[in-house]
Amino acid sequence: MRRPLIVAATALIVVLLAGASLCIGAGKAGPVDVLPALFAFDGSAAHVIVAELRLPRTLVAILAGCAFGVAGCIAQAVTRNPLGDPGVLGVNAGAAFAVAVAITVAGTAAPASFVWWALLGAGVLMTIVFLIGTAGAQGTAVVRLTLTGVALGAVLSGATTALTIVFPTAFARLRDWNTGSIATTDLSAVTVTAPLVAAGLLVALFSLRGLGMLSSGDTTAVSLGVNVRRTNALAILAVAVLAGAATAAAGPILFFGLVVAHIARRLVGPSLGGSVAGAIVIGPAIFLAADILARVVLPSGEVPVGLVTAAIGAPLLIVLARRMIGVPR
């Protein structure tokens, strides 16, 4: 009973945080304005703030938190690396580079259209990573897969920076998105992102059984009837869709999948299915909390939510890395 209770309690926390997200922020719109703005919109300033500013960013926080969290669990399973994250496989860098191209070269300005560019970049990069990781191997060379993702991600991160230098007029638009700001998102981004996150979750669920068996090694998994290459392909597709859609909506959030995966494993249990179930609700809870904190941490204005999540994730990454190499506290 422990696992369902934790998931249910976290889901309740998500509902409470979503309500707080609708109540807290810049502008004169308080708790008394939330329900009227959602169900009896009259065009007043308070109703516009709630329905057109706070509601979209709340929904994006829920979608991105869920997508990044599950993608982190799947990325750690497919790379068999407790430090795994969509960024390790290069997904975030591929999506970010494609969005940078959309803004600087194609002149794209609508946040909703970023999703398709991000998916294209994530999909192309993940295809290259998978082909290199499986070249000349019966299954998937996990080390080669990880190193390829890290290397290509580093190259594309540099290329993204170069684009902002070459096209300074687009720098402002790319800067806010690249730091993980969801302050200017709108409902069009939600309507495009939500179906893709649902599709990514469905693909992830189909890969869970095979990935769980792969944790014992490729040879054991093959003896149990697992198609190693197909299982890894499904898992990588799930990571690409989930992280690509979330990156397009919220920006390339660093370390988020890493943090959620470890918290889910600690609270729900070590099984992959349990971790994914936990990540579906733990991810939105952490993202909503980080976004609310980003709004109130400064006396005036706010900081991008990506900076808050990075401040949480970076120390955790250091602690985990020290434990892996046996460095005492």
Image (cartoon, rainbow, N blue to C red):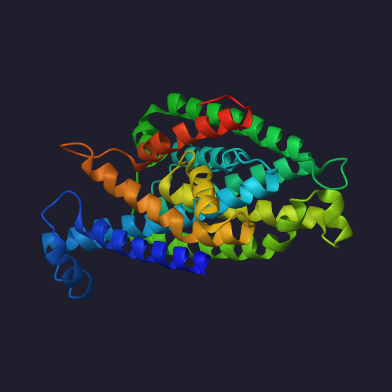
Residue occupying image coordinates x 51% and y 29%: 318
Residue occupying image coordinates x 76% and y 35%: 144
Residue 87, how many percent across, how many down?
56, 39
Pick whichever, 97 or 77, lies toward us.
77
In this rendering, the answer to whether 9 lies above or below 327 is below
Counting the numbered discs, the total is: 0
Residue occupying image coordinates x 84% and y 41%: 135
Residue 267, how many percent across, how many down?
50, 54
Pick whichever, 175 or 38, lies toward us.
38
Residue 244 appears anywhere in the view: no
In this rendering, the answer to whether 186 lies above or below 89 is below
Residue occupying image coordinates x 80% and y 48%: 217
Question: Left or right of 16: which side holds 134?
Answer: right
Residue 183, how many percent across, how many down?
29, 47
Q: Quadrant of residue 295?
A: top left
Residue 67 appears anywhere in the view: yes
Question: Left or right of 210: which side holds 261?
Answer: left
Question: Left or right of 141: which side holds 119?
Answer: left
In this rendering, the answer to whether 111 lies above or below 205 is above
Residue 305, how many percent across, how many down?
35, 42
